[in-house]
Amino acid sequence: AQSVTQLGSHVSVSEGALVLLRCNYSSSVPPYLFWYVQYPNQGLQLLLKYTSAATLVKGINGFEAEFKKSETSFHLTKPSAHMSDAAEYFCAVSPAFQGGSEKLVFGKGTKLTVNP
Amino acid sequence: NAGVTQTPKFQVLKTGQSMTLQCAQDMNHEYMSWYRQDPGMGLRLIHYSVGAGITDQGEVPNGYNVSRSTTEDFPLRLLSAAPSQTSVYFCASSYNRVTYEQYFGPGTRLTVT
């Protein structure tokens, strides 16, 4: 079974500061990993995904994440926060080769606040 | 393409009433899913489908029913609404397992009184 833990339900940063959102996963098989963003009153939008190619994955809006198997982590980073990054971020996992995108397992989410 | 569409956007039900949340996609995606989102809980999978005529249960299927008669549509039925079903419901679709990317609809906010 898969599970996802997002450390910190709320993260606050200043505009221009580093954004670091933490995600650790548990999976009995090689996982595929995703970060989604949700702006207020909207659906989820894919930021980036890891599907066993390069361990450093670049996504939209300047975000990137690094898959670290030894640490079972997939942390999301952005060098310089912008006010428009304020949103809720979800990490999700699916089991590679055993069914995938139709049954993602999500973390509980991290709400990012960006202060001027 | 309209992508994934959901209707209605908002709904208020009384306990015991039934209703259907509609979901449609125009991307010819084989895989479709229903999730519910509750504060502090993330998204939890209710039901999913891997093609027309094929559905299966997710993590929280009780009180919900689905069918998939066409590739485009994947309605979610609440059989007898309960206050515990107050939530935001998202429908999602993906092309195939190789792509592994789900596209989400805008959601339906349901309140059961």
Image (spheres, coloured by chain):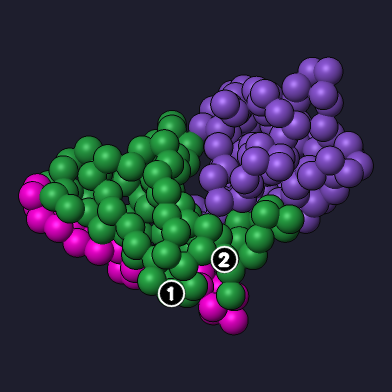
Chain colours: A purple, B green
Q: Is residue B71 above or below residue B109?
A: below
Please report the bounds of the magenta region as a residue range.
Answer: B1-27
Q: Is residue A16 in view?
A: no
Task: Assess disc 1: are there few (<14), some (14-19) or many (≥20) residues with their C-alpha within 10 Å of its C-alpha.
Answer: few
Q: Is residue A32 in view?
A: yes
Q: Amino acid at mark 1?
A: Thr
Q: Is residue B43 left or right of residue B30?
A: left
Give the image location of residue A9, x and y in percent: 54, 28
Q: Quadrant of residue B91?
A: bottom left
Give the image location of residue B61, x and y in percent: 33, 42
Q: Is residue B56 magenta?
A: no
Q: Residue at 49% of width from left, 72% of height from top?
A: B71
Quarter of the rendering occupied by the N terminus of chain A: top right
Q: Residue B70 bears which disc, if any?
A: 1
Discs 2 and 1 carry the same chain letter: yes
Q: Residue at 67% of width from left, 48% of height from top?
A: A85
Q: Using the image as rendered, state which of residue B91 and residue A36 is in the foreground.
A: B91
Q: Chain of mark 1?
A: B
Q: Which residue is the site of mark 2?
A: B30
Q: CA distance from mark 2 to mark 1?
A: 10 Å
Q: Is residue A65 left or right of residue A93?
A: right
Give the image location of residue B36, x and y in percent: 39, 46
Q: Quadrant of residue A104?
A: top right
